[in-house]
Amino acid sequence: MSTKTSIIVQARMSSSRLPGKVLMPIAGLPMLAYQIERLRRVNRANLIIVATTTQIADDPIVAFCEAEEISFIRGSEHDVLSRYHKAAQHFSVTTVVRVTSDCPLIDPQLIDDAIAAFEDGSCDYVSNTIAPTWPYGMAVEVFSTKALAEAQTESRDASEREHVTPFIYWRPGRYQVRSLTRTPDLSQHRWTVDTLEDFELVRRIFETLHPTKPDFVMEDVLALLAEHPDWEDINRHVAQKTIAPQRTINYDAP
């Protein structure tokens, strides 16, 4: 691998809807431990970095990283863009893979596919979130540190700074943006963890699949939910938060 491709996971304890969720226990292990285990199976990345904040409340995340020998960086709580830029600079990252700690079920193969799509050299940014066709909780973005540095220098918009990548994908005339979609559309599934109901669903999935198949993939989750269709009623009512302001942008599908 010629470049340093790093997965940067943003994580903090002060979630507005479910504080402390990243370290909430599932079968005796913090939720973040399961996500890191899955990220370690990504073949095309050189390093995993947890990007947390300088807040005292996030000391437990740092303690977890130190105990598990996971690279980490601490930065601004709300200016997450600057936190990513700091992480990329500190660890000499060339290509950034962005995931969030509320997506513990993220499929390693999907991340590898996104990195491969980026590495073909025809785009500046790859994501499966522009036109959502994957389950919520499978979000991945891949982009260059050059684009990240430009966003860090030029962005003045609060939404761009909080959500890291809008500066890039809101400017398809400046950056070549590639959207990863799939058929059939699975965006009706909600596997992200933002509320207690979300956590309950994810807890059931891990406690059922992980003991016998720790390397389970997205298809295994779909099969499990087909066996227990009532499980998805647990968090069906939860509304997905959106990035404001909303913008309508025409992307050229690759």
Image (tube, grey):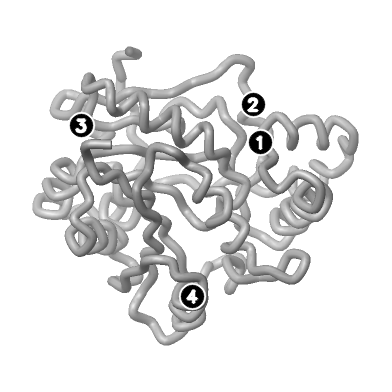
* Mark 1 in CB contact with mark 3 (< 8 angstroms): no
Residue at screen point 51% across, 32% down: 110
- Which label's residue is closer to the chain start, 3 or 2? 3
Residue hosting label 3: 171
Residue hosting label 2: 186
Residue hosting label 4: 61
Mark 1 or mark 2: which is in front?
1
Q: How many C-alpha atoms fall within 10 Å of the one at disc 4: few (<14), some, or many (≥20)?
A: many
Mark 3 or mark 2: which is in front?
2
The amino acid type found where label 4 is placed reads Ile
State the residue in front, 119 or 167.
119
The amino acid type found where label 3 is placed reads Arg
State the residue in front, 107 or 229.
107
Q: Where, quadrant-wise, is the N terminus in this rendering?
A: top left
Query: Marks 3 and 2, Cα distance to the nearest angstrom?
Result: 27 Å
Above or below residue 32? Residue 114 is: above
Above or below residue 218? Residue 60 is: below
Mark 2 or mark 4: which is in front?
4
Could you tell me residue 126's position as x and y percent?
34, 30
- Which label's residue is closer to the chain start, 1 or 3? 3
The amino acid type found where label 1 is placed reads Val
Above or below residue 43? Residue 30 is: below
Residue hosting label 1: 217
Left or right of residue 173: residue 80: right
* Secondary structure beneath label 2: loop
Could you tell me residue 236's position as x and y percent?
75, 43
* Secondary structure beneath label 4: helix
- Which label's residue is closer to the chain start, 1 or 2? 2
